[in-house]
Image (cartoon, rainbow, N blue to C red):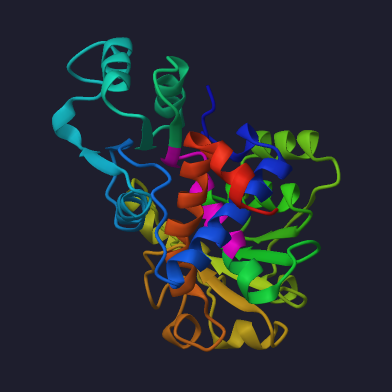
C-alpha cells in the first residue's frame, strides 16, 4: 500500500507526475471544470494540531474531486481509548484515505504500519511534504523550469526546511538554509537526503545577505513553532538578524520571489513591506496547497486517471 509520510516515499518521476496532475487540475478548475475523479470516496482528517490551510485545502480539494471528508479531532480518542491497531483497522473500514497532522512523526508511522488505508502526512515535527509540493508548484508557476533554481530558507532548520531540502534534491534545485548557529537542520535527515540523492546541492550558512545574493526564491517561517513557546525569548534574540525584509530583498536579485508557509508573525520573521510586496507569492503559495494535494489524492487513489489524462 502506498503512503506519503515523507517525500522519501516517492521518487522524482512520481513527484513530477503529482505536480503535473496538480497543474492540470488547477487549469481545469479555473475554467470551471471540476472532474469527479474520486466520486464517493471518503477522506479522514485525523488532527492533533490546529489547522487552517491543511484542513480547508484538503476538505475543499476532496469536494472538488467528487468525494467527501470527515474531520477527526480529539473526540475520536486516537492513542487514548483503545489499542492503536484496533483504532486504525476500524478506521480503515470506514474511510478510503487519511491525512494525519500529528505532534510526533512516530505516530504517523505507526498509523501507516497497519496498512489499513493510505496515510498522508499533513505535518509532523519531522517534515511537511504537502507544503513542499505546494511550494515548488508555486516556484514553477512564477519562474518556469525548476532545475538549477536556488531556494534560500531564512530561519529555523525545522520540519518545513527538511522537506524543502529533500524536494530540491529530488528536482535538481539548489537549497540553502541561512540560520543562526545551533538551529541547523537535523544531520541525520540531511545525511539521508545526500545518500539518496548524491548530487544534492544543500548548503547551510549564518549569513542571510550573502545567501540570497543569487536566490530565485526566498522563504521564511515563524521563529517560534507550536510547542516552542518556552523558548520564545531565546529564539527571538537568536533570529533577530534573520528577518525577511526590504533590506534583505535589496541584496537579492530583482526577480526573486518571497515565500512563507503561513501563519506569519508579521514584524518578526517577515515584515509587511516584504510579505505584501510585488515580489511576494505567499497567497498564491497558500492556494497551491489545495492544488498540490488534489494531485496527490488522485495519484494515491486513481492513478489510472492520471495515465489517461495528464502529460508529464
| Residue plotted at (43% across, 66% down) | 29
How far across and down, in percent of the image, does residue 254 sit? Answer: 69, 88
Closer-to-camera residue (200/136) = 136
Q: Which residues are magenta?
A: 121-137
Residue 125: in magenta span: yes
Outermost residue on the right side: it is 199
Q: Is residue 156 above or below residue 236?
A: above
Outermost residue on the front side: it is 308
Is there any visible trace of residue 201 in the rendered image?
yes
| Residue plotted at (40% across, 32% down) | 104
- Apparent side of residue 82 relative to residue 297 in the rendered image (left or right): left
Quadrant in the rendering for residue 266: bottom left
| Residue plotted at (45% across, 25% down) | 106
How far across and down, in percent of the image, does residue 300 sit? Answer: 51, 36
How far across and down, in percent of the image, does residue 114 sit? Answer: 42, 14
Is there any visible trace of residue 182 in the rendered image?
no
- Apparent side of residue 218 relative to residue 75 in the rendered image (left or right): right
Amino acid at each position: 500500500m502506498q503512503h506519503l509520510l515523507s517525500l522519501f516515499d516517492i521518487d522524482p518521476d512520481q513527484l513530477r507526475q503529482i505536480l503535473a496532475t496538480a497543474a492540470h487540475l488547477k487549469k481545469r478548475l479555473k475554467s470551471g471544470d471540476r472532474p469527479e475523479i474520486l466520486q464517493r470516496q471518503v477522506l479522514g482528517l485525523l488532527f492533533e494540531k490546529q489547522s487552517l490551510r491543511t484542513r480547508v485545502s484538503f476538505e475543499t480539494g476532496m469536494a472538488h474531486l467528487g468525494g467527501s471528508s470527515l474531520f477527526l479531532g480529539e473526540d475520536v480518542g486516537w492513542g487514548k481509548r483503545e489499542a492503536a491497531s484496533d483504532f486504525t483497522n476500524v478506521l480503515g473500514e470506514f474511510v478510503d484515505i487519511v491525512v494525519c497532522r500529528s505532534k510526533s512523526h512516530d505516530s504517523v508511522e505507526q498509523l501507516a504500519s497497519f496498512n489499513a488505508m493510505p496515510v498522508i502526512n499533513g505535518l509532523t515535527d519531522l517534515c511537511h511534504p504537502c507544503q513542499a509540493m505546494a511550494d515548488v508548484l508555486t516556484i514553477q508557476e512564477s519562474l518556469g523550469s525548476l532545475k538549477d533554481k536556488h531556494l534560500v530558507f531564512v530561519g529555523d532548520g525545522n520540519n518545513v526546511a527538511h522537506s524543502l531540502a529533500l524536494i530540491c534534491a529530488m528536482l535538481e534545485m539548489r537549497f540553502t538554509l541561512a540560520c543562526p548557529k545551533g538551529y541547523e537542520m537535523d544531520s541525520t535527515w540531511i545525511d539521508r537526503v545526500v545518500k539518496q540523492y548524491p548530487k544534492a546541492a544543500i548548503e547551510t550558512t549564518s549569513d542571510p545577505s550573502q545567501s540570497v545574493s543569487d536566490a530565485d526564491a526566498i522563504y521564511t517561517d515563524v521563529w517560534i513553532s507550536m510547542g516552542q513557546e518556552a523558548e520564545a525569548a531565546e529564539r527571538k534574540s537568536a533570529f533577530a538578524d534573520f528577518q525577511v525584509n526590504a533590506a534583505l530583498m535589496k541584496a537579492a536579485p530583482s526577480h526573486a520571489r518571497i515565500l512563507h508557509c503561513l501563519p506569519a508573525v508579521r514584524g518578526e520573521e517577515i515584515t509587511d513591506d516584504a510579505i505584501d510586496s510585488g515580489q511576494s507569492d505567499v497567497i498564491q503559495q497558500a492556494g497551491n496547497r489545495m492544488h498540490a494535494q488534489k494531485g496527490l489524492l488522485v495519484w494515491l487513489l486513481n492513478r489510472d486517471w492520471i495515465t489517461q489524462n495528464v502529460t508529464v
